Image: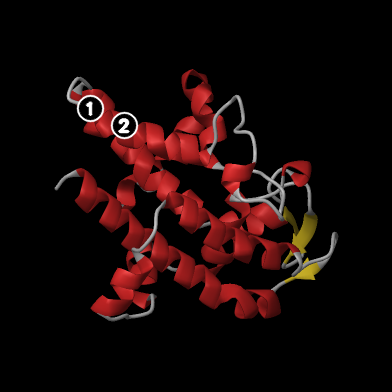
């Protein structure tokens, strides 16, 4: 599972997969719900997840297609829980908010997409083992709802993240310390919800 978790990003370098570029995120106003806005003509995160499920569960899909879209689904559920993938159109999900991360040029999207996790210096296994331990009841609570509910939940965090910085701000240990629990909780929720989705697909 960990080996395919970045599959969706790895194929970006190949132009034949450019049609999937918009599937990694969904941008809409902070005061709106996803269902209140017109979907992008290029697709978005929600459309991508639903399409993956449709192909995986179809009786006429080829084995190769099912494998491709299953790997993509694993990646997209992770994206759904990264706050800056539920961002605002005007700044491209935080990509246009330039910052300094430990003295290096970065932006708000990259800080959440890679900087904080990469600089923590853990392998996938070490990071997974360090996540909070929760009860079966807590797992069931996290798994409630659907992707629309989960997006609204992530959007609440997104709005807080936008308010957490100013353009050009120098970020480092203090910012990571403040937000690391959120990073861990989002990783945990993403994994638990992906498990529920896969259980439902392959029941």
Residue 121 in view here: no
Point 71% across, 54% down: residue: 30
Say which of 76 and 46 sits in front: 46
Residue receiving disc 1:
58
Point 27% across, 57% down: residue: 196
Point 54% across, 36% down: residue: 44
User: For residue 118, which numbered disc appears in the image?
Assistant: none
Q: Quadrant of residue 57?
A: top left
Lateral position of residue 164 relative to residue 59, left or right? right
- The local crowd at label 2, few if under 14, some if 14 to 19, many if 20 or more residues have their Cα within 10 Å, is some
Q: Quadrant of residue 122?
A: bottom left
| Residue 142: percent from left, percent from top | 37, 68
Q: Secondary structure at mark 1?
A: loop
| Residue 184: percent from left, percent from top | 47, 71
Does the CB distance between marks 1 and 2 fall below 8 Å? yes
Q: Secondary structure at mark 2?
A: helix
Lateral position of residue 90 relative to residue 196, left or right? right
Residue receiving disc 2:
54
Say which of 152 and 182 sits in front: 152
| Residue 78: percent from left, percent from top | 44, 53
Establish if 132 lies above or below 117: below
Lateral position of residue 69 relative to residue 107, left or right? left
**Number of marks in the rendered image:** 2
């Amino acid at each position: 599972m960990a080996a395919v978790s970045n599959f969706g990003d790895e194929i970006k370098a190949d132009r034949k997969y450019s049609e999937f570029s918009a599937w990694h995120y969904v941008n809409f106003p902070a005061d709106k719900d996803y269902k209140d806005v017109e979907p992008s003509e290029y697709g978005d995160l929600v459309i991508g997840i639903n399409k993956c499920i449709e192909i995986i569960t179809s009786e006429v899909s080829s084995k190769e297609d099912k494998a491709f879209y299953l790997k993509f689904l694993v990646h997209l559920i992770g994206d759904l829980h990264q706050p800056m993938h539920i961002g605002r159109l005007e700044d491209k999900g935080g990509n246009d908010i330039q910052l300094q991360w430990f003295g290096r040029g970065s932006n708000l999207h990259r800080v959440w997409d890679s900087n904080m996790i990469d600089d923590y210096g853990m392998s996938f296994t070490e990071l997974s083992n360090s996540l909070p331990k929760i009860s079966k009841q807590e797992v069931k609570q996290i798994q409630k709802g659907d992707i629309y509910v989960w997006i609204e939940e992530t959007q609440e965090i997104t709005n807080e993240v936008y308010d957490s910085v100013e353009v050009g701000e120098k970020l480092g240990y203090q910012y990571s310390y403040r937000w690391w629990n959120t990073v861990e909780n989002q990783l945990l929720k993403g994994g638990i919800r992906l498990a529920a989705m896969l259980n439902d697909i392959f029941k």
